[in-house]
């Protein structure tokens, strides 16, 4: 390996490491004090990186929030959830996607709770969250269409969409996990039981 | 009517009027800026009453929050909801109590949203909200017991309680009313449809 390539590799690793440190600091600050109380300066201080680096890489508080959301989706393995919705057998689709959805929210519920609270307090953060939630709606539409095509839908598609919208929301998961102290699996059982009973198993 | 009784009556009316003005100001401030940004001084200013009056009547920010909660329950006619749960015929109990619950939340959803957000940001407010939510749990326990006694429960009582806990939460109502733009009646139909399909109609 030439010295130049070695240098480039080390530099890329350092960039990735800095990014990871900033994201971890942002997550911790959101969890502790909430999004609106976490300035980019404070994130830089906690991550022990230069202020300029944070501003340069993430642009703004909202840019950092977007990066934290995208990082959540990566850590929660969003592609695995999407694969279930798009390719899972229709006979077990409802149970599998609701269960996979609970696993998704269980990745970091304390962070999800604070980020959603930020969305109701800050209009720009709310808009960002709605854009990400549109991805969930699109997965639900695929689920409803696949169940309908397989002749496994006991209610009209519009009703099925409303039902899945409410059963796969973070708030719904959290009502059972935090509110009733249920495990992720028990929460998934309650919610997929509801989905199957109403939409057709 | 003696002059003394007239004076007492006018004084009682003035006390009630002041209380109403303070509660209205607190509600408006919670809705606009949230609970944690609304000081008692600010509430007094907006209600156009003396600071001392607010401190004397409500004691603290938390005392005022409790008064706003109790006032919400009165405005939303909590006794009507309790009557349905305790006396409604078992055949229509699920649909009636879920529908009555949606009407209850529809009284002032913007205020409910902000008050619940306060509970997740402020531990003391959270404790107060949990105490009020214990009243909801008690109504759900009565519902489950009555359905069980009438032989109308298709699942174990523990599961029925978890299901009703999630279906009657404000967050669940709000996912459909605000998130999907459904009317109160359509929201009630989706949620009572779920309750009946899973628990037995």
Image (spheres, coloured by chain):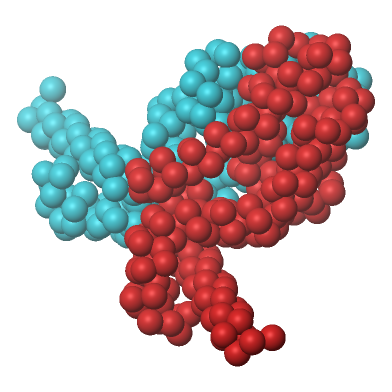
Chain colours: A cyan, B red
Q: Is residue A15 visible?
A: no
Residue A39 drawn at (x, y percent) = 25, 57
Q: Nearer the viewer, residue A55 or A201?
A: A201
Quadrant of residue A68 in the image? top left
Residue B189 drawn at (x, y percent) = 85, 40
Say left or right for A81 vs B44: right
Q: Nearer the viewer, residue A18 or B148?
A: B148
Work out whether B7 lies above or below B161. Answer: below
Residue A29 drawn at (x, y percent) = 26, 44
Say left or right for A65 vs A189: left
Image label count: 0
Say left or right for B141 vs B113: right
Quadrant of residue A115 in the image? top left
Q: Is residue B47 visible?
A: yes
The quarter in which the C terminus of chain B is drawn is top right
The quarter in which the N terminus of chain B is drawn is bottom right
């Amino acid at each position: 390996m030439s010295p130049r390539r070695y240098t480039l590799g080390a530099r890329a690793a350092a960039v990735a490491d800095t990014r990871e440190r900033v994201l971890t600091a942002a997550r911790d600050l959101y969890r502790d004090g909430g999004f609106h109380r976490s300035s980019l300066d404070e994130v830089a201080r906690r991550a022990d990186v230069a202020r300029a680096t944070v501003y340069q890489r993430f642009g703004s508080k909202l840019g950092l929030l977007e990066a934290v959301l995208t990082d959540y989706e990566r850590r929660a393995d969003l592609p695995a959830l999407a694969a279930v919705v798009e390719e899972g057998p229709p006979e077990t689709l409802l149970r599998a996607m609701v269960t996979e959805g609970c696993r998704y929210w269980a990745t970091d519920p304390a962070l999800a709770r604070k980020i959603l609270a930020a969305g109701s307090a800050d209009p720009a953060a709310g808009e960002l969250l709605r854009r990400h939630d549109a991805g969930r709606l699109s997965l639900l539409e695929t689920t409803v269409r696949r169940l309908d095509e397989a002749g496994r839908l006991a209610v009209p598609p519009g009703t099925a969409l409303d039902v899945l919208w409410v059963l796969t929301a973070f708030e719904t998961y959290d009502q059972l996990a935090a509110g009733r102290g249920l495990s992720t699996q028990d929460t998934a059982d309650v919610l997929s039981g509801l989905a199957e009973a109403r939409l057709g198993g």
